[in-house]
Every structure is written in C-alpha cells, then in structure tokens.
Image (cartoon, rainbow, N blue to C red):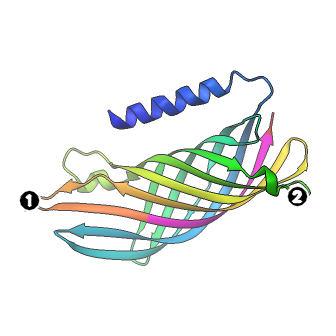
Amino acid sequence: MKKSLIVAGLLLAGSSLLADDANKLFVGIGTNIGTGEQTASIAGISATADGDYDSIPITFGYITSDGDRFKISYQKINADYSSDKEEYTGFDFDYDWTIQSWKANKILPYIGVGVGFYKYDGSAEYLVGNEDLNGVALNLNAGILYQPVDNIDIELGYKFKHIKWQDIKLWSGYTLEQEDDIGSLYIGLNYKF
C-alpha cells in the first residue's frame, strides 16, 4: 500500500510537470560502475560481503523551466561478490536540482535524491511462496551535465544507493534482514526532444 501511494504520487507529480510547454523531455542511457557491500543480520549478528556492482540504466526524464530534472530509470544491477553473483532489477524515481549559479561554459552541476523499487532476481528459489525479494532504495546523486550541442547532454556523476530488502522470517523464529550499499560512478548520454 505504502509503495503504491509513493509511486502514484511520483507519477502525479510527473504528469503535472508535463503541462508546461516550455520544458523538455529527454531519454538517456548510461553505465554505473562501482563498489559496495551487502549486509545480512540475524538476531543482532551481522555479516558483510564486499562486491563490485555495474548496471546500464535506461532513463526517461523531464527538464523543468528551472533546468531541474525528474527522471524515471530502469536498470538491472549486477552484483559480483567473491563467492557469488546476484542481479537486482528495478525502477528509480529521481529528482535532480541543477545549480544554475555554478553554471560555466556549458557545464551544469546538479545534486539529487530519489527512491527505487527493486526485485532480488533468483531469490525465490530459496523462499517459501516462490516470490523474489522486494527492496526499496534511497538514492543520492551528484554530478555535472555537459551540453556540447543543443539536444545532447553528457552526464558524469557519483551515485549512492541504499537498498533495504524485505525481511525474511526464518523457521527458528528469527528474522533475516538484508541491505546493500552501493557507490558508483556514472557516465551517460541524454537526448533532449
């Protein structure tokens, strides 16, 4: 229910933004490459695994009259731990504020925040009910946009993502809690309509 309300609110906000004819839509593709860790906890005892992460997000977005950006991205995150490989798929809903006062020679810095909704692909085979784990992400973004020509942006940034996976009740009565913290460099190309 809570997730549905968040998604509905974001979609409503996005649709009201589209009413302004002076603004632009854009599509983009890029790559995230980074590192992070997965933490699992049971009864106050935690274990972590370091990993390498990469993904290729596909983005649809909207640029406001102030130059800020609302983005919806789909991506599959590949997580490579020393003993295992995992995949997470999902959608991110991000809002990036551009810092117009720092704009210089076609370079525009930004900071952003967002939420994401993910599935832990392949986790169903280990769970009763045969459904993959769901996770909610908090996203923090910072970077620069470079505009070599009117309709093209090159984006370079740093992205932090914290994914909290749904808790798993174990037969012993304990609860398994899992989360991922991912820091990555992002480079992308956006085409503005």
Q: Position of residue 118 (x, y in %)?
A: 43, 48
In this picture, residue 12 sits left or right of residue 110: left
Type of amino acid under label 2:
Ala
Tell me if residue 187 is in the magenta stretch: yes
Quarter occupied by the N terminus? top left
Tell me if residue 180 is in the magenta stretch: no
- Residue annotated with mark 2: 104
Residue closest to the eye, 14 or 126: 14
Residue closest to the eye, 139 or 59: 139
Give the alpha-carbon distance from disc 2 to disc 1, as whole Å.
58 Å
Residue closest to the eye, 99 or 121: 99
Looking at the image, residue 66 lies above or below residue 174: above
Q: Position of residue 134 (x, y in %)?
A: 35, 48
- The single residue placed furthest to the front in the displayed view is 101
Type of amino acid under label 1:
Gly
Give, as a single range, the part of the protein colored magenta.
Answer: 181-191
The secondary structure making up most of the magenta span is: strand
Quick one: label 1, few (<14), some, or many (20+) residues within 10 Å? few
Looking at the image, residue 84 lies above or below residue 77: below
Q: Earlier in the sequence, mark 2 or mark 1?
A: 2
- Residue annotated with mark 1: 173
In this picture, residue 121 sits left or right of residue 54: left
Instruction: State the SS at label 1.
Output: loop
- Is label 2 or label 1 in front? 2
The image quarter containing residue 27 is top right
